[in-house]
Image: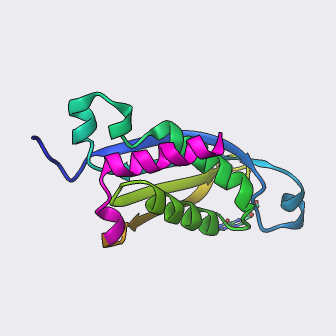
């Protein structure tokens, strides 16, 4: 079977309203965040089977990231980005994640400001197959329902 180390499942422009910011006035409101995520993973099983259970499900990623952003209520974008990438690497079968979080309304003179980080999975997480991780996600969502 065809194998590659450079497949990517991505999310671009995920919009989340969340409490974010270092100033007191920011703690009392929500602001829009725009999030891009690139999850490096092996998509070859899903490419052959055409079964979402073999895929790193971007719908589940969007749901999780939206929920975590609202829960975390970080002051700094750096803190939020770090926590979200750690959680994604723990939950999903991917070996590398690049994530950017932007605040499009924070600075009037700028289109957006933000941070971008890249992190790698520890070896043990990397060994989880996409199918095993997808099953864990599906099972935990079934438990939540
Ligand atoms: N590197 C960062 N600089 C700043 C941040 C941040 O999260 N990371 N945050 C702020 C304020 O919350 C700002 O968005 C209010 O306009 C300032 N600098």
Relative to residue 62, is residue 126 drawn left or right? left
At 35% from the left and 55% from the top, the residue drawn is 94
Relative to residue 144, is residue 29 drawn left or right? right
* Mark count: 0
Q: Quadrant of residue 21?
A: bottom right
Q: Main secondary structure of the magenta part?
A: helix
Relative to residue 67, is residue 5 drawn left or right? left
In the depicted structure, whether residue 11 falls above or below residue 136: above
Q: Is residue 34 visible?
A: no
Residue 37 lies, in percent from the top left, at: 47, 49
Residue 133 lies, in percent from the top left, at: 39, 51
Give the residues drawn in magenta, as a range: 124-145
Q: Is residue 99 visible?
A: yes
Q: Look at the image and tell me in which quarter the C terminus lies.
A: top right
Ligand 1: image quarter: bottom right
User: Is-magenta flag for residue 128?
Assistant: yes
Q: Look at the image and tell me in which quarter the N terminus lies.
A: top left
Residue furthest top as drawn: 50
Residue 53 lies, in percent from the top left, at: 37, 37
At 32% from the left and 48% from the top, the residue drawn is 130
Q: 73 or 104: nearer the eye?
A: 73
């Amino acid at each position: 079977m065809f194998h590659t180390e450079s497949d990517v499942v991505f999310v671009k422009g995920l919009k989340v309203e969340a409490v974010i910011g270092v100033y007191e006035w920011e703690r009392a409101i929500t602001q829009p965040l725009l999030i891009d995520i690139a999850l490096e993973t092996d998509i070859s099983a899903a490419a052959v089977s055409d079964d979402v259970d073999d895929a790193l499900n971007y719908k589940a990623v969007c749901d999780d990231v939206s929920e975590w952003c609202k829960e975390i209520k970080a002051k700094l974008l750096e803190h939020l980005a770090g926590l979200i990438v750690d959680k994604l690497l723990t939950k999903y079968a991917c070996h590398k994640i690049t994530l950017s979080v932007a605040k499009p309304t924070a600075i009037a003179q700028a289109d957006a400001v933000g941070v971008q980080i890249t992190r790698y999975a520890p070896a043990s997480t990397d060994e989880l197959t996409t199918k095993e991780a997808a099953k864990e996600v599906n099972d935990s969502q079934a438990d939540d329902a």
